Image (cartoon, rainbow, N blue to C red):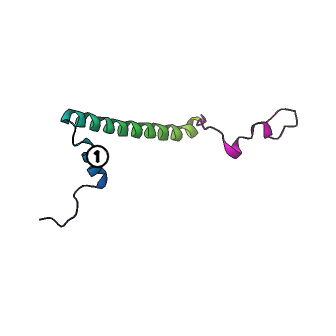
């Protein structure tokens, strides 16, 4: 008895349609690589979050690339002693 509602999301249906014609070992390999990529991204995100939380405690600066209004370069106002900064 079906009410016309699909049981899987459109992402799942797309994934199955792309891999459905491949052998099982290829499907399993691709699925394992997708899961591995997801876990690696999650671990990297967690590592960065932990580093950002530890930085204020240890006094170590969190490495951030200066850009835009934070980085004036040659246009920065000169100090009174003649240096830039």
Residue 73 colored in magenta in the image: yes
- What is the magenta segment's predominant secondary structure? loop
How many neighbours does mark 1 have within 10 angstroms: few (below 14), some (14-19), or many (20 or more)? Answer: few
Give the residue furthest to the front: 21
Residues in magenta, as a range: 59-85
Q: Residue 65 location, x and y as percent?
A: 62, 37
The image quarter containing residue 6 is bottom left
How many numbered markers are drawn?
1
What's the residue at 28%, 55% (across, down)? 9
* Residue 13 percent location from the top left of the image: 26, 51
**Residue drawn at 24 percent across, 55 percent down:** 8
70 on left or right of 62 = right
**Relative horizontal placement of residue 23, taking residue 56 as reference (left or right):** left
Which residue is at a point 61% across and 36% down the rendered structure image?
Answer: 61
Residue at point 88% right, 37% down?
A: 80
| Residue 55 rendering spot, x and y as whole percentages | 56, 37
Is 39 in front, or is 57? 39
Is 67 on the left or on the right of 27, as rendered?
Answer: right
Q: In front: 80, or 26? A: 26
Q: Quadrant of the N terminus?
A: bottom left
Disc 1: which residue = 15
Name the element at disc 1. Answer: helix
Q: Position of residue 63 (x, y in %)?
A: 59, 35
- Image side of residue 82 versus residue 40, left or right: right
């Amino acid at each position: 008895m079906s009410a016309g509602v699909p049981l899987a999301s459109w992402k799942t249906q797309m994934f199955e349609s792309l891999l459905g014609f491949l052998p099982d070992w290829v499907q399993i390999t691709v699925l394992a690589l997708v899961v591995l990529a997801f876990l690696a991204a999650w671990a990297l995100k967690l590592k960065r979050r932990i580093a950002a939380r530890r930085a204020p405690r240890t006094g170590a600066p969190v490495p951030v690339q200066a850009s835009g209004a934070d980085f004036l370069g040659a246009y920065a106002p000169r100090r009174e002693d003649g240096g830039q900064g």
